[in-house]
Image (tube, grey):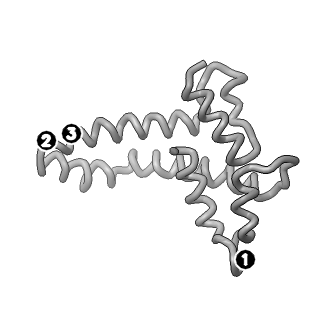
Amino acid sequence: MSILTFSSDIMGDLCFAESLQMLEGSDYSPWVKVIFAGIKTATKLKSFKMLGRLPTYIIEQILFKSKVVRAKQLEHWNYSKERVDRRLARNPDRPDLWTKILEKGAPNDKEGLSLGEHHSIASVFMVA
């Protein structure tokens, strides 16, 4: 078991009162695989951009707009969205981070966050 497996499973549980079930198995969940691959790639690309304007242009204007990169971004977004939607559909028997968020108002309440804002927060929480 790696620290990444451990911390990702804990974040899933803290955020959504639901385990990512990575501690039970020996493999990362598909969602965590996407996150880690994205972080590794972003680190390499950041270094490549330091070489000058041409590499920066290629990365920002061509690579980041490619279908492959967009598909990976969408895959992460969909995993985040799915977890939030499942969490909002139930009332867990113990508090989680969403309990605190929902205290400010349910999605699309006049005082609360929109459903899209909930999805965005989940995306950031899991990367963090």
Helix or strand or loop: what does disc 2 sit on? loop
Dot 2, how many residues are within 10 Å of its Cα: few (below 14), some (14-19), or many (20+)? Answer: few
86 or 111: nearer the eye? 111
- Foreground of the two, 29 or 11: 11
Q: Amino acid at mark 2?
A: Leu
Tell me the element at label 1: loop
Quarter-of-image position of residue 1 = top right
Drawn side of residue 81 relative to residue 36, left or right = right
Name which of mark 2 and mark 1 comes first in the sequence.
2
Q: How many marks?
A: 3
Which amino acid does the dot numbered 1 rest on? Answer: Asp
- SS of the residue at dot 3? helix
Residue marked by disc 2: 51
Work out how far the residue at label 2 is from the one at label 1, CA to CA, in angstroms. Answer: 48 Å
Instruction: Name which quarter of the figure residue 41 lies in.
Output: top left
Q: Residues within 10 Å of mark 3 (few under 14, many from 20)?
A: some
Residue assigned mark 1: 109
In depth, the one of 60 and 15 nearer the eye is 15
Left or right, 74 with respect to 108, comes to left
At which x and y percent is residue 49? 20, 44
Cβ atoms at labels 2 and 3 below 8 Å apart? yes
Closer to the camera, 50 or 69? 50
Q: Which mark is residue 48?
A: 3
Residue 88 drawn at (x, y percent): 76, 58
